[in-house]
Amino acid sequence: MALSPTQQAVLRWREGGPALFAQEVLGADPTDQQWDASRNLVKRRRVSIRSGHGTGKSTFMAWCVLWFLACYFPAKVPATAPTAHQLEDVLWSEIAKWHRTMKEKYPALGGQFTWSAGAFRMASAPNESFSVARTSRPERPEALQGFHSENILFLIDEASGVSDNVFEVAEGALSTDGAFVVMAANPTRQSGYFFDSHHKMRGAWAALHWDGEASPMVSRAYIENMAKKYGRQSSVFKVRVKGEFVGAPDGVMYASGNPILNAA
Ligand SMILES: Nc1ncnc2c1ncn2[C@@H]1O[C@H](COP(=O)(O)OP(=O)(O)O)[C@@H](O)[C@H]1O
Ligand SMILES: [Mg+2]
């Protein structure tokens, strides 16, 4: 039987990844870095992005939510970050923003989903296809645990700051065959699951590096300001602009609680 135009479109978006979906359905203009992550997500399924501030990591994750729930069914997208601010004020508000655009540009698709604080659901199958936000706290390590679906995408924003026990509890689910995982962070910590995805576990990941200086989303004024304030050779510049891991192993200065490195 011939595929309907909608079925054909969904298959093309699946293959094209979240960047193609964002371009065609949301009218966005993904950066080269976001295109690269999109291709890697389709091909490798496990993507870990180290990057400077403001390159579009959280935006990419928001696109991933809409893409995955539109292209797979049933589908679950557990999303986490170390603080409610990063999760609710940043990622969840990006989802709201792009969902509004989707409803305008593609009402037939956008109208199928409902956004609420902490959850984004398919209206007609709210318990089968959804994304939920759960803050990762060391004392509540089950943020990514307990989700089962044929199609699953884990999103971990500011992954450097997510405590190790959250990853320990979720390790089985995260490494399940077929699961999609996107994690992204300023590389503020020299140990842990995110660090390992760029080092000893690198073979299991598409480990990507987004340099802030190569991103059209990062203002030149921000870069110049950081260079002037800290120096281009400083650790702060390397972490916050260049997206490089620096410092002593398990360094005190780069610990996830460092307010300078976690201010944004
Ligand atoms: N491809 C894009 N097109 C337009 N705006 C974008 C794009 N990617 C990111 N942005 C915007 O750039 C800003 C920074 O993006 P964000 O995803 O918060 O960066 P990060 O998570 O890497 O710090 C946000 O205002 C976001 O909406
Ligand atoms: Mg972000």
Image: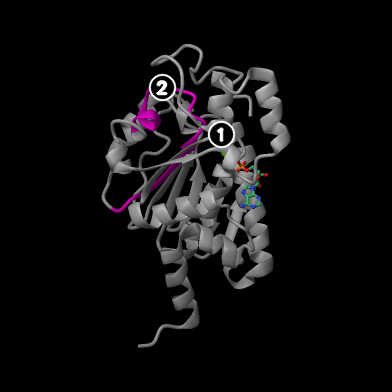
Which type of secondary structure does the marked residue at label 1 adopt?
A: loop
Distance from the alpha carbon under mark 1 to that under mark 2: 15 Å
Q: Residue furthest bottom?
A: 1
| Residue at which label 1 appears | 52
Task: Kindly identify the amino acid type of the residue bearing the numbered disc 2.
Answer: Gln
Residue 27 visible in the shown view: yes
| Residue at which label 2 appears | 190
Q: Nearer the viewer, residue 38 or 210?
A: 210
Residue 117 visible in the shown view: no
Residue 250 image offset from top left, x and y in percent: 40, 16
Task: Kindly identify the amino acid type of the residue bearing the numbered disc 1.
Answer: Gly
Give the residues drawn in magenta, as a range: 178-196
Relative to residue 175, is residue 151 depicted above or below?
below
Residue displayed at 58% across by 67% down: 24
> Which circle's residue, 1 or 2, is located before the other in the chain?
1
Ligand 1 closer than 8 Å to label 1 CB:
yes
Q: Nearer the viewer, residue 142 or 222?
A: 222
Ligand 2 closer than 8 Å to label 2 CB:
no
In this image, 13 relative to 88: left or right?
left
In this image, 199 relative to 123: left or right?
left
